[in-house]
Image (cartoon, rainbow, N blue to C red):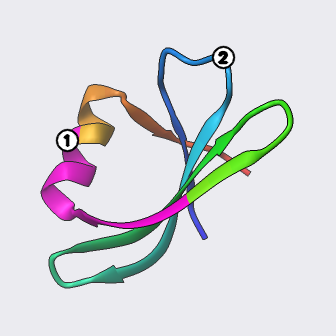
Amino acid sequence: MKQFAIRGTSQAPSVLELINEIENGYFVRIIHTHEDWEDVQEEFMTKELFDTCLRTGYIAEVSG
């Protein structure tokens, strides 16, 4: 599963994980880690939006 760091204004690290790819986009899991808890959301993201986030640097693949 590929992971991407999400650039944001918060001190808490956030990660986007690709769950599944379909014809017109991706199902993703977004994890916002806070000091005492995690906020986890699963969403659909179009390929166009995903590519825009990569191109602008809003998300960057985490090597590992």
Q: Residue furthest bottom?
A: 22
Q: Earlier in the sequence, mark 2 or mark 1?
A: 2
Residue 52 - label: 1
The amino acid type found where label 1 is placed reads Thr
**Magenta span contains residue 47:** yes
Q: CA distance from mark 2 to mark 1?
A: 23 Å
Give left or right: position of 37 versus 6. right
Q: Which mark is residue 17?
A: none
Q: Nearer the viewer, mark 2 or mark 1?
A: 2
Q: Is residue 17 magenta?
A: no
Occupied quadrant, residue 35: top right
Could you say whether the residue bearing mark 1 is in a helix, strand or loop? helix
Mark 2 is on which residue type? Answer: Gln
Residue 36 in the image: state x and y as whole percent: 86, 37
Residue 40, image x, y percentages: 60, 57
Q: Are marks 2 and 1 in contact (CB under 8 Å)?
A: no
**Which class describes the residues within 10 Å of circle 1: few (<14), some (14-19), or many (20+)?**
few
Q: Give residue 11's mark.
A: 2
Q: Is residue 46 above or below residue 52?
A: below
* 53 over 8 or under it: above or below: below
Describe residue 60's horizontal placement relative to residue 21 as left or right: right
Q: Position of residue 58 (x, y in %)?
A: 37, 30
Of residue 63 and residue 13, the one placed in the foreground of this image is 13
Q: Is residue 32 above or below residue 40?
A: above
Q: Which residue is drawn at the image coordinates 32% and 40% (left, top)?
A: 54
Foreground residue, 13 or 50? 13
Q: Residues within 10 Å of mark 2 (few under 14, many from 20)?
A: few
Quadrant of the rendering where the N terminus is positioned: bottom right
- What span is in magenta? 41-52
* Residue 35 located left or right of residue 47: right
Q: Name the residue: 15% across, 76% down.
A: 24
